[in-house]
C-alpha cells in the first residue's frame, strides 16, 4: 500500500469529517488507507457511518498526540505515513505531490507542505528551525512578522519566488507531515516524552540525526484552521505545556545545562514583560481603554510562564 493517513481526533469531530471528505476527493492516484484515532474524547461512530472505508480506533485513554499517532501507525500498512490534523482541508494534488517527492530521493526522510489560513494566506509556522535559546527568547510576534526571513526562524524558503520549490528545513509542522515508514520506525516513532507540542520537532531532529533530510514542498498546499483540538484547554496549561516541551527537547538535543539556561532566560524574559505590562495596565486603567482585557490576558500568560520557569508550577 502506498500511503496510510493517520488522523488523531480530540473533540474535533466536525473538522475531522470535512478533512476526510477532502482526502477522499484528492487521493485517487494513490493506494491508501485512512485511520482515525479518537483520543478518548467523543463518540466518533458518525465517521464510520459516513465513511465506512475509514478505520476508526477508539483509545480508552487520552494518550496525547504522540501516543495516538503511534497507535495509528501500529495499525497501518502504508509505505508512507501522512500524519494529518483533523482541522485541515487537503487541496488538490497536495498529498500526491508530497508522496512523489518522498519517493524520488532515497535520503529524504520526511516532507511537509505549505499550510494556509482559511483565507488562503500563509501560515508561517509551516517550517521552523530547531529550538535554541536565542530563537525562543526572540520569538515575539512583532519581530517574526516584520523580519520573517531571519535565518533563526527557518522560514526563508516560504517566501521564495519559485512556486514549485522543494527546500531543506529543520522542522515541518506536525499538522501535515509525511514520512517514510521505514524511517519513522527506525528512529523510534513519535517520542512519548511529550504529551502536547514539540513532537514533530523531536521527530524531525531524530530523522536528521539518522542521516536523512527533511524538506518542505511549496506546491503542496493544505488549509489549516489551527488549534481546534486545544481550544478547550486552559490557557495556563497550554502556556506551560509549550515551554515544558521545548525544555524537554533541549535537554535531549543539547544537554541539561543548556536547557537550564533556557529556563533561566524565560525568567528574565517573563520578568521584563511583566514589568512592561504592569506599566501598560496602569496607563490603560487610567484611560479606561478596552484593550485592557488583552493586556490582562498577556500578564496572566507571562505570570504562568514565570512560575513554571522558577519551578513554582509543575
Image (cartoon, rainbow, N blue to C red):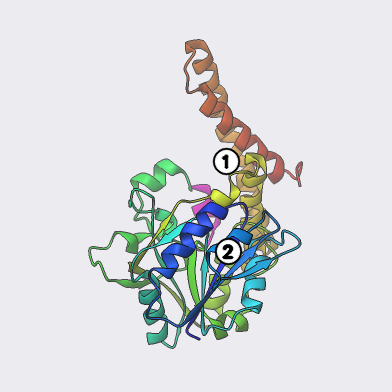
- On the image, the x and y values in percent for residue 206 come to 58, 75
Magenta residues?
Answer: 129-138
Callout 1 secondary element: helix
Callout 2 secondary element: helix
Q: CA distance from mark 2 to mark 1?
A: 50 Å
Q: Residue furthest left?
A: 161
- On the image, the x and y values in percent for residue 23 come to 44, 68
Q: Nearer the viewer, residue 243 or 80?
A: 80
- On the image, the x and y values in percent for residue 60 come to 76, 62
Could you classify mark 1 by the number of other residues whose Cα lies within 10 Å: few (under 14), some (14-19), or many (20 or more)? some
Residue drawn where x is 62% and y is 40% of the image: 235
Whether residue 133 appears in magenta in the rendering, the answer is yes
Residue drawn where x is 38% and y is 77% of the image: 28
Residue under label 2: 49
Residue drawn where x is 45% and y is 85% of the image: 107
Q: Nearer the viewer, residue 255 or 9?
A: 9
Amino acid at each position: 500500500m502506498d500511503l496510510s493517513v493517520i488522523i488523531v481526533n480530540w473533540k474535533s469531530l466536525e473538522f475531522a469529517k470535512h478533512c476526510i471528505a477532502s482526502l477522499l476527493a484528492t487521493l485517487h492516484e494513490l493506494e491508501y488507507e485512512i485511520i482515525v484515532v479518537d483520543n478518548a474524547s467523543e463518540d466518533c461512530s458518525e465517521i464510520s457511518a459516513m465513511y465506512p472505508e475509514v478505520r476508526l480506533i477508539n483509545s480508552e485513554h487520552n494518550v496525547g498526540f504522540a501516543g495516538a499517532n503511534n497507535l495509528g501507525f501500529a495499525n497501518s500498512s502504508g509505505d508512507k505515513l501522512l500524519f494529518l490534523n483533523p482541522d485541515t482541508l487537503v487541496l488538490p494534488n497536495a498529498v500526491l505531490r508530497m508522496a512523489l517527492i518522498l519517493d524520488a530521493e532515497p535520503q529524504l526522510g520526511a516532507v511537509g507542505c505549505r499550510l494556509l489560513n482559511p483565507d488562503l494566506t500563509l501560515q508561517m509556522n509551516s517550517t521552523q528551525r530547531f529550538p535554541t535559546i536565542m530563537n525562543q527568547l526572540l520569538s515575539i510576534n512583532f519581530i517574526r512578522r516584520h523580519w520573517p526571513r531571519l535565518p533563526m526562524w527557518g522560514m526563508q524558503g516560504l517566501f521564495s519566488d519559485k512556486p514549485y520549490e522543494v527546500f531543506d528545513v529543520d522542522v515541518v509542522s506536525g499538522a501535515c507531515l509525511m514520512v517514510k515508514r521505514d524511517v519513522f520506525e527506525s528512529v523510534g516513532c513519535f517520542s512519548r516524552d511529550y504529551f502536547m507540542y514539540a513532537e514533530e520537532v523531536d521527530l524531525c531532529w531524530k530523522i536528521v540525526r539518522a542521516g536523512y533530510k527533511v524538506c518542505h514542498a511549496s506546491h503542496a498546499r493544505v488549509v489549516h484552521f489551527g488549534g481546534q483540538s486545544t481550544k478547550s484547554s486552559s490557557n495556563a496549561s497550554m502556556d506551560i505545556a509549550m515551554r515544558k516541551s521545548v525544555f524537554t527537547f533541549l535537554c535531549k538535543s543539547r544537554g541539561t545545562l543548556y536547557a537550564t539556561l533556557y529556563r533561566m532566560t524565560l525568567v528574565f524574559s517573563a520578568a521584563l514583560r511583566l514589568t512592561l505590562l504592569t506599566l501598560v495596565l496602569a496607563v490603560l486603567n487610567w484611560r479606561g481603554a478596552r484593550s485592557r482585557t488583552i493586556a490582562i490576558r498577556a500578564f496572566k500568560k507571562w505570570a504562568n510562564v514565570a512560575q513554571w520557569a522558577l519551578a513554582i508550577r509543575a
